[in-house]
């Protein structure tokens, strides 16, 4: 019998992959979203977390970018 | 024409009478403006419309004139104009150059460009993409106008020359401002005494003459010869007359308070500290002589403008010869000089002189130290305090606003204070305190002009993006590494270094970045090679390594603002090693990387600050600056040793010959020496 799970396939670069892994590790067990780590740049995660991951990444990027005040 | 008159009709009459000898094009301009022009101005006075330049009227030959003058006192100067040099000399005398990293010129320039294109529908002489290096900004402040009047420039002169150079009709606010600032000059003393703080500080001398008890002396008005082309002969003659000055003495402990009271937030009489060293017979003289470069001359002439030594700050890039400026100032004053530096390494730079009047070179810490000292140093410090110094020379003056260093100024009595620095910014905005602690900014050098003149190196700045490996990045995300390492920031001179690779930025300030860049600024090689298109057009290189996707990106961009605003070109290198370099690079293999990561993580906190090089191939690391903590006897190698007497053999009989030594018994160091 085959088990099938619906999920989201994520493909990214190495640093962001690490960021996602880190984020996952920081969440409590009930909210962890990574189903399977395929390799250093691809993941299989729960389907509802797309928006959350995007906003977390953009926040991280904003922290690292400096905008000169005009 | 008194200072109180401000009517427009009067101004127009004066110009048409005086300008007879000028070209007719200018006179046509003045009659060109309708009288309603100024009404539009008053509408512009609201805060929100500060950047709305569309109401400025352009003159017909605006292409020939180099200045933009704005209502809030800002002046922009085109460096590519044929009149640049004279305009520059004039502006230096009446206005302060703005430290360029404090504002964004580009958006303002965009507004100005918009204005000129709207009005005349033709291409602007600078084009639409004007870079900071081609436009300079100056600010008219009460201080700068005060300085101008004190060298003898009169109000009407200033206004007329500004008008002559300006592309637009001078804004009414600016004219009013100039009148208001310069009107204060000269009537100050009695008003000052009425203020309670200052009145109490006054010391009445026994031989007070005259009804007010003021000491009266003469001073000559001087003016820079560069103005000849812009001023008429009658104006020059007025300046050269002698003027009378009145003076009263203030108790030395309250001097700082008095100066504070005169700032804009209290009485608003901007103070200039001047030292009449030529007429100072009380202090003994000192002998010296020197030869300075043109920009050094300019900065000194700002300081000695009217025959007296003015207190203030001179801003020059690190290797442009700040020390020489300081020494020149000291030699011109010819009185005792106290030089303060930030650390013992920079103290080595200064020359030493002998004589009855002396030069003392020391560090801020030595003078400001509050705790107990040894008896010897106590004696020396007492002497420093009791002596009346002619000149207090402060190197790296940007550290002075810090609490400890302020004490230095109040402890030592000096007639004139000169501060030298390459970077007049601090992250904590206490830089404005320097205005009353030391004095106003007398001169700021333009870095790019200095490069063109070949005095400092032409630096190519590059940022190299380094991606982190997976494991390192994972560790980065988990922790904050906050250990800091301070190397090469201040005063160390590494004249032969051409390249700087900055590895770690750690929340660095703009000042640190600029100071580090200063290490390689010394101009090397022949002048012709350094000109555009020559062999070594860029002969100094500044690389900054930045890890991608980390906080370093943020800090790196922030720090570079100073350099970008100065006009240095920046390029970003996104991938440095060529992809096939492969196995030749260290740490190429994953297990080496993991081993390094492990080592980094397990290293204790104490070793974090200092890097241990296994093999110091050319013995350059820490060559010049080795800092260690210890007592004097440790540093001189005498730790634990005791003085012991021994005979040198001089009492032996003269006739004895020295026996030839047995080679095998020689000390190992000398074995190879004698063949």
Image (cartoon, rainbow, N blue to C red):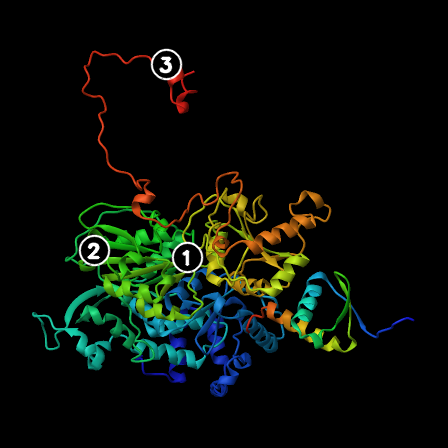
For the residues labelled 1 and 3, the Cα–Cα distance comes to: 63 Å
Under tag 3, what secondary structure?
A: loop
Q: Residue furthest right?
A: A1
Image location of residue B354, percent across then percent down: 22, 45
Question: Mark 3 — residue?
Answer: B662
> Mark 1, chain letter?
B
For the residues labelled 3 and 2, the Cα–Cα distance comes to: 55 Å
Q: Horizontal placement of B274 versus B402: left or right?
A: left
Q: Is residue B224 visible?
A: no
Q: Is residue B495 visible?
A: yes
Q: Earlier in the sequence, mark 3 or mark 2?
A: 2
Under tag 2, what secondary structure?
A: helix
Say whether mark 2 and mark 3 are on the same chain. yes
Answer yes or no: do the residues labelled 1 and 3 have beta carbons within 8 Å?
no
Q: Report which quarter residue B192 is drawn in.
A: bottom left
Question: Mark 2 — residue?
Answer: B378
Answer yes or no: do the residues labelled 2 and 1 have beta carbons within 8 Å?
no
The 10 Å Cα crowd at callout 3, few under 14, some 14 to 19, many 20 or more, is: few
Question: Mark 1 — residue?
Answer: B316
Q: Earlier in the sequence, mark 1 or mark 3?
A: 1
Q: Report which quarter residue B384 is drawn in.
A: bottom left
Q: Horizontal placement of B170 versus B268: left or right?
A: right
> Mark 3, chain letter?
B
**Front-most of B424 and B538?**
B424
């Amino acid at each position: 019998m085959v088990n099938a799970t619906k999920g989201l396939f994520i493909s990214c670069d190495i640093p962001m992959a690490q960021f996602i892994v880190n984020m996952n590790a920081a969440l409590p067990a009930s909210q962890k979203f990574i189903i399977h780590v395929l390799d250093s740049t691809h993941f299989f995660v729960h389907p509802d977390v797309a928006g959350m991951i995007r906003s977390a990444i953009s926040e991280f990027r904003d922290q690292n970018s400096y905008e000169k005040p005009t | 024409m008194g200072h109180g008159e401000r009517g427009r009709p009067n101004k127009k009459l004066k110009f048409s009478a005086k300008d007879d000898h000028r070209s007719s094009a200018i006179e046509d301009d003045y009659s060109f403006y309708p009288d309603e022009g100024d009404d539009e101005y008053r509408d512009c006075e609201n805060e929100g419309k500060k950047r709305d330049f569309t109401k400025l009227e352009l003159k017909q030959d605006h292409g020939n004139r180099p200045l933009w003058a704005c209502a809030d006192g800002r002046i922009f100067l085109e460096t590519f104009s044929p009149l640049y040099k004279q305009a520059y000399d004039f502006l230096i005398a009446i206005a302060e150059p703005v430290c360029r990293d404090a504002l964004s010129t580009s958006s303002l320039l965009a507004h100005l460009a918009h204005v000129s294109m709207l009005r005349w529908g033709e291409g602007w002489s600078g084009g639409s993409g004007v870079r900071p290096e081609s436009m300079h900004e100056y600010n008219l402040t009460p201080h700068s106008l005060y300085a101008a009047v004190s060298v003898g420039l009169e109000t009407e002169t200033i206004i007329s020359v500004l008008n002559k150079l300006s592309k637009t009709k001078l804004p009414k606010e600016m004219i009013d401002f100039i009148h208001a600032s310069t009107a204060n000059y000269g009537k100050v003393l009695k008003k000052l005494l009425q203020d309670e703080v200052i009145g109490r500080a006054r010391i009445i001398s026994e031989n007070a003459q005259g009804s007010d008890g003021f000491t009266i002396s003469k001073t000559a008005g001087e003016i820079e010869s560069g103005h000849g082309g812009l001023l008429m002969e009658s104006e020059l003659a007025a300046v050269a007359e002698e003027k009378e000055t009145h003076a009263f003495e203030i108790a030395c402990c309250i001097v700082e308070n008095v100066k504070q009271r005169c700032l804009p937030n209290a009485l608003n009489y901007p103070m200039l500290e001047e030292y009449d060293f030529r007429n100072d017979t009380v202090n003994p003289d000192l002998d010296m002589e020197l030869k300075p470069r043109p920009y050094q001359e300019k900065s000194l002439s700002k300081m000695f403008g009217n025959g007296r030594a003015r207190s203030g700050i001179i801003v020059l890039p690190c290797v442009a010869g700040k020390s020489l400026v300081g020494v020149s100032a000291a030699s011109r004053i010819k009185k005792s000089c106290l030089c303060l530096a930030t650390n013992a390494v920079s103290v080595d730079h200064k020359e030493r002189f002998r004589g009855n009047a002396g030069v003392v070179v020391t560090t801020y810490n030595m003078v400001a130290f509050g705790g107990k000292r040894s008896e010897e140093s106590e004696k020396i410090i007492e002497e420093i305090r009791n002596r009346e110094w002619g000149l207090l020379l402060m190197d790296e003056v940007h550290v002075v606003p810090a609490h400890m260093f302020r004490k230095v100024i109040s402890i030592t009595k000096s007639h004139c204070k000169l501060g030298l620095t390459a970077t007049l910014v601090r992250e904590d905005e206490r830089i404005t305190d320097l205005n009353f602690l030391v004095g106003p900014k007398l001169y700021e050098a333009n870095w790019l002009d200095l490069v063109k003149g070949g005095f400092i190196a032409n630096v190519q700045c590059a940022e190299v993006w380094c991606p982190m490996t997976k494991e390192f990045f994972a560790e980065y995300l988990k922790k904050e590494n906050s250990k800091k390492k301070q190397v090469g920031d201040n005063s160390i001179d590494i004249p032969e270094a051409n390249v700087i690779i900055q590895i770690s930025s750690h929340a660095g300030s703009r000042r640190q970045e600029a100071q580090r860049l200063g290490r390689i600024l010394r101009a090397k090689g022949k002048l012709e090679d350094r000109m555009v298109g020559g062999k070594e057009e860029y002969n100094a290189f500044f690389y900054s390594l930045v890890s991608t996707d980390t906080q370093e990106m943020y800090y790196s961009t922030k720090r570079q603002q100073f350099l970008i605003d100065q006009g240095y070109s920046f390029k970003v290198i996104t991938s440095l090693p060529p992809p096939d370099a492969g196995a030749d690079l260290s740490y190429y293999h994953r297990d080496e990387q993991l081993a390094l990561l492990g080592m980094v993580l397990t290293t204790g906190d104490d070793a974090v600050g200092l890097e241990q090089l296994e093999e110091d191939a050319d013995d350059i690391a820490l060559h010049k600056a080795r800092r260690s903590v210890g007592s004097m006897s440790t540093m001189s190698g005498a730790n634990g040793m005791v003085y012991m007497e021994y005979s040198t053999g001089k009492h032996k009989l003269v006739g004895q010959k020295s026996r030839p030594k047995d080679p095998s018994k020689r000390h190992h160091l000398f074995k190879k020496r004698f063949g």
